[in-house]
Image (cartoon, rainbow, N blue to C red):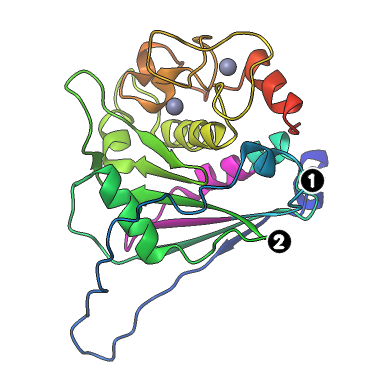
């Protein structure tokens, strides 16, 4: 009951917007394909904007998926609970998710992700509204290497993608995490990057930057921000039965930059 009241009182509203196209029986018309934007959308948003309530009292998240491939609603719910534990948004966190037309792609380059965002992102940050964008793709990342496949990618100050095909390929089997646990972990990890972790807009109190495995990851192999959380090597480090949490160094950094 207490847990229920807590969740109720934090004014989280997860609004599901099912937008269906009705074209009156005519053939669907593809939207015009825009140029790849030169700059990421809302690139001036800072980690402090997400973490503190100094500039913004509320966060609006727009999560899109390809028509017919609804995201795991429990993962989305757990993401919003995680955000509420870490950021100050007294007017709440609202998440809208909606389908977009199928793209026909099985892999997505960074330019593809930016172009799709430019085509479909409706909620933009301005002086009074803070927004984030999640694209839940049905494909792989085109930049994958033979050794490492990405499960998610934060590519802008307020934008990230989830590679659902890769997540499904490396979860749900014997000695693998459940698809739900893996998807939940990737959603939280990518938001960790939007929060400026590690040493990418949110300064480090203690040095916990992993210098051996790419950039902006935590050196603690038990932490949500350890690099394997967004790769197919996920189960080489993490338990298959639970989702990794942020550890003390990452939490201290967030608190020092306006978070909880
Ligand atoms: Zn990462
Ligand atoms: Zn950490």
In the displayed structure, does residue 184 sit left or right of residue 173?
Answer: right
In the displayed structure, does residue 158 sit left or right of residue 6?
Answer: left
Q: Is residue 62 above or below residue 189?
A: below
Q: Is residue 42 above or below residue 205?
A: below
Question: Where ligand 1 lies, by image quadrant?
Answer: top left
Q: Along the line of sight, which residue is nearer the eye, 29 or 168?
A: 29
**Crowd band around label 1 with a 10 angstrom C-alpha radius: few (<14), some (14–19), many (20+):** few
| Residue 226 makes an appearance in the image | yes
Question: What residue occupies the far front of the structure in this picture?
Answer: 38
Q: Residue at x 29, y 86 (%)?
A: 23
User: At numbered mark 1, what does the secondary structure look like: helix, strand or loop?
Assistant: loop
Q: Quadrant of residue 259?
A: top right
Stretch in magenta: 61-80
Q: Which residue is mark 2?
A: 128
Q: Position of residue 106 (x, y in %)?
A: 18, 47
Q: Position of residue 255 (x, y in %)?
A: 75, 26
Q: Residue at x 52, y 25 (%)?
A: 243
**Crowd band around label 2 with a 10 angstrom C-alpha radius: few (<14), some (14–19), many (20+):** few
Labels 2 and 1: the sequence-earlier one: 1
Q: Magenta span has 100?
A: no
Residue 54: mark: 1
| Residue 138 makes an appearance in the image | no
Q: CA distance from mark 2 to mark 1?
A: 11 Å
């Amino acid at each position: 009951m207490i847990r229920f009241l807590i969740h109720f009182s934090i004014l989280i509203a997860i609004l599901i917007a099912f937008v269906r196209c009705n074209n009156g029986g005519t053939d669907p018309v593809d939207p015009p394909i825009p140029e790849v934007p030169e700059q990421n959308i809302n690139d001036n948003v800072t980690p402090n904007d997400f973490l503190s309530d100094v500039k913004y009292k509320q966060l609006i998240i727009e999560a899109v998926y390809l028509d017919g491939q609804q995201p795991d609603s429990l993962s989305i719910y757990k993401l919003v609970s995680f955000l509420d534990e870490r950021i100050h948004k007294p007017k709440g966190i609202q998440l809208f998710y909606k389908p977009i037309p199928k793209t026909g792609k099985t892999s997505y380059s960074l330019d593809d992700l930016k172009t799709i965002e430019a085509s479909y992102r409706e909620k933009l940050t301005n002086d009074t509204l803070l927004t984030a964008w999640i694209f839940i793709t049905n494909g792989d990342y085109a930049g994958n290497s033979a050794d490492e496949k990405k499960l998610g990618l934060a590519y802008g100050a307020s934008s990230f993608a989830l590679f659902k095909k890769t997540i499904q390929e490396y979860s749900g089997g014997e000695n693998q995490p459940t698809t739900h646990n893996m998807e939940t972990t990737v959603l939280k990890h990518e938001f960790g990057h939007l929060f400026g972790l590690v040493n990418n807009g949110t300064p480090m109190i203690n040095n916990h930057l992993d210098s051996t495995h790419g950039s902006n990851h935590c050196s603690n192999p038990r932490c949500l921000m350890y690099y394997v959380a967004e790769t197919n090597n996920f189960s080489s480090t993490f338990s298959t039965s639970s989702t990794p949490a942020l550890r003390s160094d990452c939490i201290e950094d967030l608190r020092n930059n306006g978070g909880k």
